[in-house]
Image: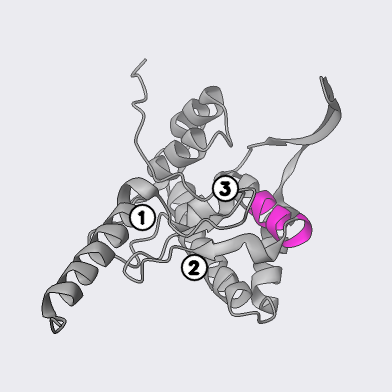
């Protein structure tokens, strides 16, 4: 059996629905489309830990590049755009669009599976275990995360990277709620360096006493 190679995706959002939105080639010109087909979608779901390796393999073997998989992938891109619009509305302190709610509900209606109760050190956890009998159902874990954002999370912690050229979203889980950048290694460092050079230039151009 051919081994499925892992791919690298941006994972800075803290919520799966935000990481999914961040796969779009928006913002910086350096960013490119992360999802090109159904196989990429499965790879992203696996790396986001939303599906198991066995579910990823079965998805490839059963549907691969067939018509149903192509249709599911097209729906995934529409869902991604819908989630981005929803996030932008929240950031602008506006109501979540009704079409977005309808789109999420439509995916939820197609989900099948069972509830599972597990015990952990901190107590009990009730979790829905999806069953993937159709490629459309692979969108289920994504909208579950979107529902978590809408129903359970503090919207004031939802942020867009402070670098105007970036456009990546994240959920600020820091204690002081002061996270500004998608990553300190990328945008945070660039913006700090740019600010440093602006200060240096201002100092050089300022009149001497």
Residue pointed to by mark 2: 81
Residue 78 in the image: x percent, y percent? Answer: 50, 65
Pointer 3 or 1: first along the chain: 3
Q: Nearer the viewer, mark 3 or mark 1?
A: 1
**Mark 1 → mark 2, Cα distance in angstroms:** 26 Å
Q: Nearer the viewer, residue 20 or 89?
A: 89
Residue at image point 46% right, 61% down: 77
Viewer-closest of 192 and 68:
192
Q: Earlier in the sequence, mark 1 or mark 2?
A: 2
Disc 1 element? helix
Observer able to see residue 31: no
From the viewer's perspective, is residue 50 above or below residue 91? above
Residue range highlighted in magenta: 143-152
- Whether label 3 touches label 1, CB < 8 Å: no
Foreground mark, 3 or 2?
A: 3
Q: Secondary structure at mark 3?
A: helix
Q: Quadrant of the N terminus?
A: top left
Q: What color scheme is it?
A: one colour
Name the residue that disc number 3 marks.
16
Few, some or many residues within 10 Å of mark 3 (<14, 14–19, 20+): many
Q: Nearer the viewer, residue 94 or 112?
A: 94
Residue 124 visible in image:
yes
Image quadrant occupied by the C terminus = bottom left
Looking at the rendered structure, which numbered label has been put on residue 188?
Answer: 1
Taking the image as shown, residue 42 lies to the left or right of residue 104, namely left
The residue under the point 40% across, 40% down is: 39
Measuring from the top left, give residue 32's x and y in whole percent: 27, 56
């Amino acid at each position: 059996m051919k081994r499925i190679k892992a791919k690298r995706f941006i994972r800075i959002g803290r919520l799966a629905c935000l990481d999914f939105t961040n796969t779009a080639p928006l913002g910086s010109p350096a960013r490119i489309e992360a999802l090109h087909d159904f196989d990429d979608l499965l790879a992203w779901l696996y790396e986001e830990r939303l599906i198991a390796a066995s579910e990823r393999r079965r998805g490839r073997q059963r549907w691969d590049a067939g018509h149903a998989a192509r249709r599911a992938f097209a729906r995934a891109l529409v869902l991604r755009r819908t989630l981005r619009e929803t996030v932008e509305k929240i950031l602008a302190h506006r109501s979540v669009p009704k079409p977005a709610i309808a789109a999420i509900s439509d995916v939820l209606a197609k989900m099948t599976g069972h509830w599972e109760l597990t015990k952990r050190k901190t107590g009990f956890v009730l979790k829905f275990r999806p069953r993937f009998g159709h490629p459309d159902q692979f969108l289920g874990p994504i909208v579950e995360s979107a529902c978590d954002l809408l129903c359970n999370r503090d919207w004031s912690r939802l942020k867009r990277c402070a670098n105007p050229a970036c456009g990546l979203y994240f959920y600020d889980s820091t204690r002081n709620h002061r996270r500004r950048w998608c990553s300190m290694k990328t945008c945070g460092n660039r913006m700090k360096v740019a600010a440093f050079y602006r200060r240096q230039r201002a100092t050089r151009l300022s009149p001497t006493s």
